[in-house]
Image (cartoon, helix red, strand yellow):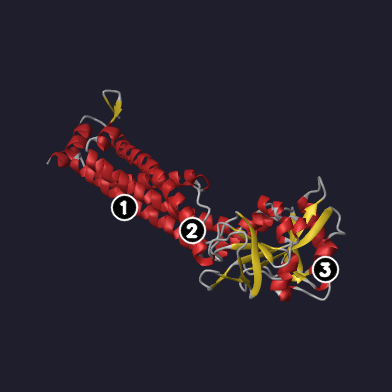
Amino acid sequence: MRLGGKIPLAWKNLTEHKLRLVASVAGIAFATTLMFMENGFRKSILDSMVNIIERIDGQVVLVSRTLYTLSVPFSFPMERVVQARGVEGVAWSGPMYTVTRSSYWRNPETGDEERICVVGYAPEDDLLDVPELKAGRHLWSRPNTAMADDRSRVERFGAFEPGQVSELAGKRFEVVGTFSLGINVQTNGNLVVSDRNMMSAFPELDGPSLMDRKAHVGVIRTEPGADPRRVRDALAEALPPDVRALTLDEFIARERDFWDKVAPIGTVFYIGVVMGMIVGSVICYQVLYSDISDRLPQFATLKAMGHSNLALYRVVLGQALYLALIGYAAGLIVSHFLFQWVHRMTGLPMDVARNNPYAILLLTVLMCLGAGAYAARRLISADPAQLFA
């Protein structure tokens, strides 16, 4: 329905009172921002939990059959990594180690010990696709040296700088360089060390011979043109049942699913998104119900002139849609700056573009249309004589 064939009545009603419009948009923007932030925290945490796995330079991995998350690594015999080299389609295999529960770095400024994620592998293997680690392999291959993540929490570990000397697991280590990866909710920083330095800091992984060592992840590089899924199946058939072969994509998906569906992270933030929708629905309902109440005589006139209930219904839903789009745009802008601030403060990978913005738009529109449909019941159920009374 339009005024004079140009201006939609829904838009005219919504913008007539400027202060009310600003307050209404602010309310919807608040709800939209809340949904963005809840979903953003969920996705950033899930991304942070797989940031190491995503950097693995391989197509297939071997893990312990009992592994459920890399944050609680289960070891398996190094022999399995060696056996994998004889399987068809495997070009190369090597071990990688991750320790998070028993690895502590001493803050050189405060003397406090803080838990840190330690990743170990042979520097020449280039198991992580991180340019700084590849370029500096000659540095951290030396005894008692480590590369540090420059996005680690400074207040926990101090500022990681080349030449800094402190203790890892009670042993003296020197930071010889930095790289950029990002933290997660389990630990506030990352160190990368050579396999020999890993064995020195955590002797429980070592053994009298290579075959007696333990591994946490076996990284498999397939031959050119080989299908990783076929290589995975071949490994599953050839190796004992104490290990599981997964493509890298499957490994990433399993890790994300654990934190999203098994751990409470996904549930908590899903509830937050639902609460944002509820808050927005209540705000939108109150705004539209108040506007309908103020305009009952005008709607009565339209109804007496022969406009159908459906036409009036479309006016209210039009107001709800305009309110949703404007509120979403405002919430998107606010969320963009909040995401940047959270990223700077926490190091979590917060990014609006990777935060399902179209899904949030859809939820905002559904939220407002639902509230508008509910608010319009009073208008649709009344007759013109009652409205003029």
Q: Which quarter of the figure is the N terminus placed in?
A: top left
User: Looking at the picture, does residue 97 appear above or below residue 341?
Assistant: below
Q: Which residue is mark 1?
A: 282
Q: Amino acid at mark 2?
A: Thr
Q: Which quarter of the figure is the C terminus placed in?
A: top left
Between 226 and 387, the one nearer to me in the picture = 226
- Tag nearer the camera, 3 or 2: 2
Q: Residue at x 52, y 69 (%)?
A: 109
| Any part of residue 105 in sight | yes
- The earlier-in-sequence mark between 1 and 2 is 1
Within 10 Å of disc 2 (Cα), the crowding (few <14, some 14-19, many 20+) is some
Q: Position of residue 186 (x, y in %)?
A: 56, 66
Q: Which residue is mark 3?
A: 79
- Tag nearer the camera, 3 or 1: 3
Within 10 Å of disc 3 (Cα), the crowding (few <14, some 14-19, many 20+) is some
- The earlier-in-sequence mark between 3 and 2 is 3
Q: Which residue is mark 2?
A: 346
Q: Position of residue 314 (x, y in %)?
A: 33, 36
Numbered disc 3: secondary structure:
helix
Within 10 Å of disc 1 (Cα), the crowding (few <14, some 14-19, many 20+) is some
Q: Residue at x 71, y 68 (%)?
A: 198
Numbered disc 1: secondary structure:
helix
Between 78 and 190, the one nearer to me in the picture = 190
Q: Amino acid at mark 1?
A: Val
Q: CA distance from mark 1 to mark 2?
A: 32 Å
